């Protein structure tokens, strides 16, 4: 479990694209074969829910979620700025999926509402969710949506228009109202989508930009974070934790690298994210190795809340090694300065510089 009570889905999840179709693979800790909601998800094509199948290998049970050409929402927003219409569309699609799931007796607390595990088709924003029966996160949907909204708001391409339109205020005020439910929230999103942002708001946002209304020394992203913090006054402790963790992780990541020792198609790799994926796929990986022996999403390095780093193999064909010891897929291994990490036939030295 994560510290704030969320289910640590990432601990047992990895990607597999060996069959030519990208899948998210999850190894549940408990036996889910008799779970009736698991059987419902496996037996039905539920709109907006990633299709899932159960496979058994050497006495272990694995869930295979089919993703087709979709990528994690976190990867999409890292490479693309969101429009306000895009933000509303993604939130509405998520809400609609959860509402439709009720017809199949699915529980709204069993969807994984995290940017890393919401998957989108880049060209259409078609969105699918991961549903894991029996894995209740014990986080209320309103808190999951608050966290998601805060993360996505900082990716809006026109942060001035976002603030001047009042859109963010309306969403946050409803979340603070104490009567949050998915169906009503989706109705409010649809009202905003159909209403759009009027020309007056666009003009005022343009005036704000032209007047250089930002305080001296504060960049656009700093301004939007400050505004979100003020608007999120109804849950300051929640926001402080999200922002504080982000700043603390960023500071510790500034000087962590994989220094190339040998191998084709690779260079030094700077670890600049708390969850950092290494692979050949330029759309999904954070650190790119242009070598056919390396998998599309080959390995993952994570910074730990108490300090230090762990590396995971993402079920690669040619393996991930730490000091010549091959990692078991999905099982983390702590690494420290001086360790040799091999990604297939590419060797690196792990270096966490102070």
Image: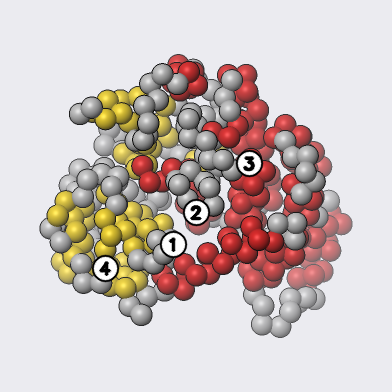
Question: Dot 2: within a 10 Å radius of its alpha carbon, few (fewer than 14), some, or many (20 or more) residues?
Answer: few
Disc number at residue 336?
A: 4
The front one of 216 and 351 is 351
**Residue furthest toward the right?**
200
Image coordinates of residue 82 in percent, x first then y, are: 61, 53
Identified at 18% across, 65% down, the residue is: 340
Question: Which residue has dot 1 on it?
Answer: 305
Q: Quadrant of residue 205?
A: bottom right
Question: Which residue has dot 3 on it?
Answer: 140
Of the image marks 4 and 3, the number of the one nearer the N terminus = 3
**CB contact under 8 Å: marks 2 and 1:** yes
**Residue furthest toward the bottom?**
216
Question: Which residue has dot 2 on it?
Answer: 3
Disc 1 is placed on an element classified as loop
Image coordinates of residue 32 in percent, x first then y, are: 40, 25
Alpha-carbon span between mark 4 and mark 3:
37 Å
Q: Is residue 262 visible?
A: yes
Question: Dot 3: within a 10 Å radius of its alpha carbon, few (fewer than 14), some, or many (20 or more) residues?
Answer: few
Judged left or right of residue 336, residue 34 is right
**CB contact under 8 Å: marks 3 and 2:** no
Q: Is residue 224 above or below residue 86?
A: below
Image coordinates of residue 108 in percent, x first then y, are: 60, 32
Disc 3 is placed on an element classified as loop
Q: Quadrant of residue 275?
A: bottom left
Of the image marks 3 and 2, the number of the one nearer the N terminus = 2
Q: Quadrant of residue 166?
A: bottom right
């Amino acid at each position: 479990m994560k510290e704030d009570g969320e289910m640590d889905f990432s601990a047992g999840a990895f990607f597999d694209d060996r069959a030519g179709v990208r899948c998210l693979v999850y190894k549940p800790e408990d036996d889910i074969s008799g779970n009736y909601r698991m059987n419902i998800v496996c037996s039905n094509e539920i709109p907006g829910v990633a299709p899932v199948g159960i496979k058994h290998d050497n006495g272990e049970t694995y869930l295979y979620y089919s993703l087709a050409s979709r990528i994690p929402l976190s990867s999409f927003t890292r490479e693309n700025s969101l429009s306000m219409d895009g933000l509303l569309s993604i939130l509405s699609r998520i809400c609609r999926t959860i509402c439709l799931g009720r017809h199949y007796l699915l529980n709204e607390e069993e969807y994984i509402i995290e940017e890393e595990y919401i998957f989108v088709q880049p060209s259409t924003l078609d969105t699918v969710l991961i549903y894991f029966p029996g894995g209740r996160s014990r986080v209320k949907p309103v808190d999951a949506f608050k966290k998601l909204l805060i993360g996505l708001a900082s990716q809006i391409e026109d942060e001035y228009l976002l603030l001047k339109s009042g859109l963010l205020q309306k969403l946050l005020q409803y979340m603070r109202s104490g009567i949050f439910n998915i169906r009503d929230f989706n109705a409010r999103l649809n009202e905003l989508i159909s209403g759009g942002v009027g020309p007056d708001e666009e003009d005022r946002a343009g005036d704000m930009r032209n007047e250089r209304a930002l305080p001296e020394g504060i960049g656009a992203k700093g301004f939007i974070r400050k505004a979100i913090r003020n608007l999120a006054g109804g849950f300051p402790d929640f926001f402080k934790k999200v922002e504080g963790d982000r700043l603390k992780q960023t500071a510790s990541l500034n000087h962590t690298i994989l220094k190339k020792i040998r191998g084709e198609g690779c260079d030094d790799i700077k670890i600049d994210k708390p969850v950092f994926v290494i692979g050949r796929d330029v759309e999904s990986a954070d650190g790119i190795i242009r070598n056919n022996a390396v998998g599309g999403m080959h390995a993952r390095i994570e910074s730990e809340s108490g300090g230090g780093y762990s590396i995971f193999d993402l079920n690669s064909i040619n393996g991930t090694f730490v000091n010549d010891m091959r990692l078991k897929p999905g099982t983390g291994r702590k690494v420290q300065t001086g360790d040799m990490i091999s990604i297939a036939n590419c060797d690196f030295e792990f270096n966490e510089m102070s």
